[in-house]
Image (tube, rainbow, N blue to C red):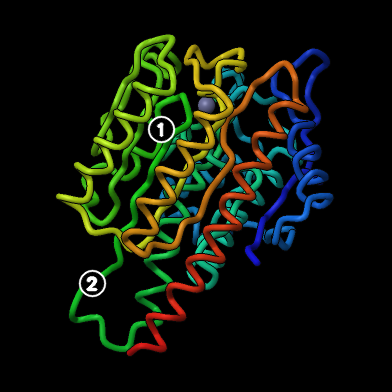
Amino acid sequence: MIDAYYTDEFVLPLPQGHRFPMQKYRILRDKVLASDCSVSLSVPTVATAGQLALAHCPNYVARIERGDVSTDEQREIGFPWSTQMVERSLRSVGATVSAVRSALQHGASVNLAGGTHHARRAKGGGFCVFNDLAVAARVYQTDYIARAVNHSKRQIPNVLVIDLDVHQGDGTAEILAGDSSVFTFSMHGATNYPFTKAVSDLDIALPDGTGDELYMTQLQDALNQIETCFTADLVLYVAGLDVHQADRLGKLALTDAGIQLRDQVVLDWAGKHRLPVAAVMAGGYFPDLERLTDLQLGVVKRLAEYGEHYAKRVYSRNSSN
Ligand SMILES: [Zn+2]
């Protein structure tokens, strides 16, 4: 049984005709609930100011919380400021923090929203207010240090961010630049938002129209490369579905089978290294939300299966010691 965290009860008041498909989150939760997959649904707590300060400028966090946000900043974020926007953003980060803590127990976990990878240290953008990935990575490391009686062997555990949303994880790259304990890998559309890319530890920019075959070759090559230079203790998987051919923003051309294979490549690799995986749903902008959420449910099922296999492996390893 893995945990899935949802925040769809915290809805933003958006102007009529706003292009963000807020209702997709509720549809996905209903599908998870109605499915036979081994998932327990929970509402996360809010991220605290102390947790946010691990990745963000405290002054930026305070300004967002009290609504001291200029029109330009709101335009860049893509949402008008409201108390609900603050609540939802804090819960969404809280969901990824909770997903990480749960993945360490059960091998896998998922935030049914999250993946707000465009939020930078002191500014939001592209529907992202706070960066759940950077905050969750740092909270995990801080938790570990707080618990460790003797951490002389290695100071802090390492986190690998595998960001396969079609948009580059520019905020994550910016916040975590120069931090050798977190490896940021982003594979994204070359011509897509953000038009000025940041520098991740590994970036792969794909041409428009990239299909399953090229995508899978590039992904496998990247994972092979990462394992030669970085030893991860946890994977943060940004499982955006905006790489699919049905997405209206993505410009890539993965099929349903390609999405399944992509997750499998990531999970097989993580399994080979016995790594817990905390996933976030991130982008997905299909005109047909039923189709989008069916595919997202597939991601959740694969994570639940991974959690089961992981638990078996860890159990057999412990009992053989
Ligand atoms: Zn995206």
Please say if 214 is above or below 296: above
Q: Position of residue 59 (x, y in %)?
A: 48, 45
Mark 2 Cα shell of 10 Å, populated few (<14), some (14-19), many (≥20)? few
Question: In the image, what residue type sits under mark 1?
Answer: Gly
Q: Which quarter of the rendering shows the C terminus?
A: bottom left
Question: Horizontal placement of 256 versus 38: left or right?
Answer: left
User: Residue 169 has which mark?
Assistant: 1
Question: In the image, what residue type sits under mark 2?
Answer: Gln
Nearest the camera: 106 or 200? Answer: 106
Nearest the camera: 99 or 71? Answer: 99
Nearest the camera: 315 or 292? Answer: 315
User: Which residue is identified by label 2?
Assistant: 155
Q: Which quarter of the rendering shows the N terminus?
A: bottom right
Please say if 45 is above or below 25: below
Q: Position of residue 238 (x, y in %)?
A: 48, 41
Nearest the camera: 252 or 57? Answer: 252
Residues at discs 1 and 2 in contact (Cβ within 8 Å): no
